[in-house]
């Protein structure tokens, strides 16, 4: 997408405005997948084409920083104008195959947070649920005994979402058992692995992407006893350090909303475990007054370049 002169001017104006309203604030963007081609079950996930213009916009009008650089600036209150960090959650293989080459093209640093239990070929429970509803060969699903007719993509997405919400807050093993039951009930086969293997994670680290921890099983930390939270947090750090042969200093809380998905218990464990930062999914920006263990993030979802730019600016205020 080539920018017309008028658009360039508007971007310049937004950039200048960002220097005023966005002074001393850090925007952290959340991505999950970057799709090689569009997926009708995931219309909000960027494709390679969309991610390319996101990154070009960041390069041209923002100051992309690594998380380490941003943390150092936050501590000294020396953040450059329009400062932004790019992060990815969960550890999808397309972070390596699709996103990383685009990040490299625009020289944009990034952090990828990985839930380590899914690096052995198992897909995450939510992707397994999505896959059940995405199978176009299937006109019907048996869901806990009820026969449900599947229709167009919109209806399939709505149904999948309903089941995701139903299962999300269950503890780890009952959640997994419920998904297994749905697969058995429908005699469904698993999708190809969507997540990176240990070797691929190491490859991503070698390409200069910072690797962060995101627990082992991606539970809602708040529903677990403190000892289990500790195991989830510490084991994922140690496992990733072993796979990558380098320290893992950054953490992302699964699901990530403070109060709803995690609380002070997890925050203290993360701090004690030796991490230097942790990111949430609470929206907004971070400043030098923010706790480095409760950094705010948001998802850029706009489909047009100017709206995307304006949204980034609006979040800074
Ligand atoms: Zn996640």
Image (tube, grey):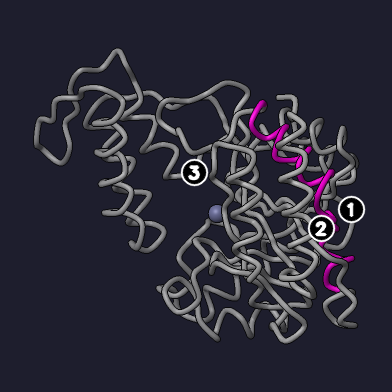
Tell me where residue 57 appears, x and y as whole percent.
Answer: 76, 42
Q: CA distance from mark 1 to mark 3?
A: 25 Å
How packed mark 2 is, by other alpha carbons closer than 10 Å (few <14, some 14-19, many 20 or more), is: some
Residue shown at the point (59%, 58%) measured from the top left: 216
Magenta stretch contains residue 298: no
Q: Is residue 116 visible?
A: no
Tag of residue 124: 3
Q: Which residue is mark 1?
A: 245
Q: Main secondary structure of the magenta part?
A: helix
Q: Which residue is mark 2?
A: 241
186 versus 269 height, above or below: above
Tell me where residue 116 appears, x and y as whole percent.
Answer: 64, 51
115 versus 281 height, above or below: above
Going from the N terminus, do you reach mark 1 or mark 3 first? 3
For the residue with label 1, is its CB less than 8 Å from the closest atom of ligand 1?
no
> In the figure, is residue 241 to the left or right of 153?
right
CB atoms at circles 1 and 2 under 8 Å apart?
A: yes
**Where's ligand 1: which quadrant?**
bottom right
Q: CA distance from mark 2 to mark 3?
A: 21 Å
Q: Is residue 268 visible?
A: yes
> In which quadrant will I find the N terminus?
top right
CB atoms at circles 2 and 3 under 8 Å apart?
A: no
Q: Which residues are magenta?
A: 49-71
- Asked which quadrant contains residue 225, the reply is bottom left
Tell me where residue 61 appears, x and y as whole percent.
Answer: 81, 49
Of tags 1 and 3, the one toward the viewer is 3
Number of numbered discs overlaid on the protein picture: 3
- Asked which quadrant contains residue 99, the reply is top right
Of tags 2 and 3, the one toward the viewer is 3
């Amino acid at each position: 997408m080539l920018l017309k002169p008028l658009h360039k001017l508007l971007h310049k104006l937004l950039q200048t405005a960002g220097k005023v309203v966005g002074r001393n604030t850090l925007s952290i963007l959340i991505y999950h997948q970057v799709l090689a081609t569009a997926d009708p079950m995931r219309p909000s996930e960027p494709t390679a084409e969309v991610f390319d213009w996101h990154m070009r916009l960041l390069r041209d009008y923002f100051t992309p920083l690594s998380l380490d650089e941003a943390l150092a600036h936050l501590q000294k209150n020396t953040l450059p104008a329009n400062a932004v960090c790019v992060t990815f959650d969960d550890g999808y293989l397309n972070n390596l195959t699709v996103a990383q080459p685009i990040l490299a093209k625009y020289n944009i640093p990034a952090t990828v947070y990985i839930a380590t239990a899914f690096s052995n070929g198992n897909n995450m429970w939510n992707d397994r649920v999505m896959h059940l509803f995405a199978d176009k060969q299937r006109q019907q699903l048996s869901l806990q005994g009820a026969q449900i007719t599947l229709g167009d993509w919109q209806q399939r997405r709505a149904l999948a979402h309903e089941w995701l919400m139903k299962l999300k807050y269950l503890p780890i093993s009952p959640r997994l058992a419920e998904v297994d039951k749905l697969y058995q009930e429908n005699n469904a086969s698993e999708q190809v692995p969507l997540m990176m293997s240990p070797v691929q994670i190491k490859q991503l680290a070698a390409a200069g992407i910072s690797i962060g921890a995101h627990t082992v099983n991606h539970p809602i930390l708040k529903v677990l006893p403190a000892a289990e939270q500790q195991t989830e947090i510490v084991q994922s750090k140690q496992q990733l350090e072993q796979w990558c042969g380098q320290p893992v200093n950054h953490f992302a809380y699964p699901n990530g909303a403070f109060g709803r998905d995690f609380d002070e218990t997890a925050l203290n464990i993360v701090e004690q475990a030796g991490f230097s930062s942790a990111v949430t999914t609470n929206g907004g920006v971070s400043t030098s007054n923010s706790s480095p263990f409760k950094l705010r993030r948001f998802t850029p979802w706009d489909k047009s370049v100017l709206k995307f730019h304006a949204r980034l600016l609006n979040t800074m205020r």
